[in-house]
Image (cartoon, rainbow, N blue to C red):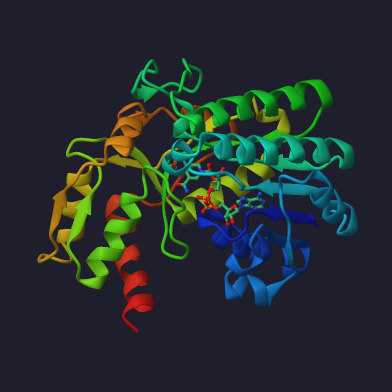
Amino acid sequence: MKKILVLGAGGQIGSELTMKLREVYGNGNVVATDLVPERLTQEIQESGVCLPCDATDANQIAKIVSDYKIDSIYNLVAILSATAEKNPMLGWNIGMGALLNCLEVAREYKAALFTPSSIGAFGPDTPLDNTPQDTIQRPKTIYGVTKVAGELLSDYYYERFGVDTRSLRFPGLISNVCPPGGGTTDYAVDIYYAAVKGEDFECPLKKGTLLDMMYMPDAIDAAINLMEADASKLIHRNSFNVTAMHFDPEAIYAEIRKHKPNFVMTYKPDELKQKIADAWPNYMDDSCARAEWGFSPKYDLEKMTVDMLDKLAKRLLK
Ligand code: NAD
Ligand code: SER
């Protein structure tokens, strides 16, 4: 059985990925950590080992890997796009610091390493329609720069030292457990919270801004499936395009209004977020992920909307 360490387990992805990993591999085999352990959900705190860990300190990671005989690390530590743009040094130091430490610890202890990349790894020179797996990556944000550097560094550690590094270029992730941490795609989560609370919603992106998106259960399955994939079938490693749907604000608004006809959305574009979103793909080609390890998401906009509204209503209106 695998012995897994999750870094940044208190965030949007970690809150759900950690519980799924415990379900698959057993509660006793998944150690959950975060810089701020209080951020870990009650469910995570009650179901297994939880520890504080600052991923910018390699010794802290190495001690946990050694103490718990860890063989797989899920590194979820980063500062998301819009927040990083307001403090670029922090974005670089956290994103790259955590990754470099993970790579070194993984090399020393022969552990496998998963680190998400992002649609943010693309930029205005990238073909934005049907964005190929292998294409121009010249992002203009510090978030994107860390993601491209991270992809290259992870491939380097695989080729140079044989570290089993794998990664996904996640699109905007939509979830109902932990609020997102300051990304450009957060609006597609926030809109559901507003609809369920009966509040009007001000959209920070303009009508017509197409972006790739994915519902969290598909993102989690994709991460675990990639880590379980037969290495001999992987032509790519860092990092795979993956997407489940793409839409603009008008389309998600229309879908929500099928269930909440009185819900009102208006537009108040945020200059920074709009600039970032305009340089990200309209939709990616994820055929390599499908061919090399069988990526196959289950949720489209319609199915996700039903589930989001149902789950949020149960939580927020009880
Ligand atoms: P998040 O901001 O919700 O969570 C990050 C977690 O890392 C937080 O709990 C935070 O406390 C923790 N953290 C921050 N600094 C730390 C440190 N020094 N040591 C240990 N923990 C620290 O982020 P997320 O949305 O869960 O994203 C996880 C990864 O997935 C990131 O690499 C992100 O770039 C990537 N990603 C996310 C999305 C998305 O839509 N959420 C999309 C594409 C890629
Ligand atoms: N959701 C993330 C962000 O907007 C994409 O990586 O930053």
Q: Nearer the viewer, residue 30 or 101?
A: 101
Figure quarter occupied by ligand 2: top left
- Residue at image x 59%, y 75%? 42
In-image side of 235 versus 122 (left or right): right
Residue 270 sits above or below residue 252 on the image: above
Could you say which quadrant of the image residue 305 lies in? bottom left
Q: Position of residue 44 (x, y in %)?
A: 63, 70
Across and down, in percent, residue 308 comes to 34, 63
| Residue appearing at x 65%, y 35% in the figure | 96
Residue 230 seen in the figure: no
Number of numbered discs on residues: 0
At 15% from the left edge and 61% from the top edge, which residue is drawn? 258
- The x and y percentages for residue 301 are 29, 51
Quick one: quadrant of the C terminus? bottom left
122 vs 227: above or below: above
- Residue at figure coordinates x 10%, y 66% from the top left: 262
